[in-house]
Image (cartoon, helix red, strand yellow):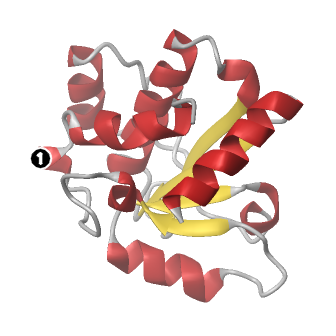
Amino acid sequence: MGLIIIVLLVWVFEMQLKNKILFVCMGNICRSPTAEGAFRSIVDNKNLSQNFDIDSAGTHAYHIGNSPDQRALKAAIDNGVDLSKQRARQVHESDFYYYDYIIAMDSDNLEILKSMCPKESNSKIELMLDYSVEYPGGSVRIHTMKGILIKSLKWFTQPA
């Protein structure tokens, strides 16, 4: 499956189409905004921002409109990533039609997303750490995020 996705991403890059990626956790104040910020940083550093539309959301409405958690903000800043402009939002049905990839931070949110997904959607709903060689199938935990997200996200920007 990974090879197929890489081949499709190369095709998309050649066609100059945008890859639309949504990162999702429960409240959209820790893990998913950090993943969004880390991925945006990787894409910007590779001068590929024109090829991506990146966002994050939560499966629950706990924190709509709030900034990321202070610990997430600090951890991101310590790693050269700015999350200060992000605001929490909840996943909406329209996301399943707009985004090519909806990446869940853990298996609980993966199952929630799959249960919410309309049958007509073409979004690929996947687990973040399925892209990790070191932690396939695992859950992103806030205290173990440093480095794991970066390693997992880099494959999206690697040439085939």
The answer to which of 112 and 154 lies nearer the viewer is 154
Q: Describe the element under mark 1 as helix, strand or loop.
A: helix
Q: Residues within 10 Å of mark 1 (few under 14, many from 20)?
A: few
Identify the amino acid type marked 1.
Answer: His
8 above or below 53?
A: below
Residue 152 picture location, percent across and down:
35, 44
Q: Residue at x 30, y 28 (%)?
A: 73
Residue 128 picture location, percent across and down:
40, 57
Residue 41 picture location, percent across and down:
47, 20
Q: Is 36 placed left or right of 159 in the picture?
A: left
Residue 137 seen by the camera: yes
The answer to which of 13 and 104 lies nearer the viewer is 13
39 above or below 111?
A: above
Q: Residue at x 63, y 38 (%)?
A: 54
Quarter of the picture holding the N terminus: bottom right
Q: Quadrant of residue 62?
A: bottom left
Q: Residue at x 45, y 55 (%)?
A: 63
The answer to which of 72 and 19 lies nearer the viewer is 19
Q: Which residue is mark 1?
A: 143
Residue 113 picture location, percent across and down:
55, 76
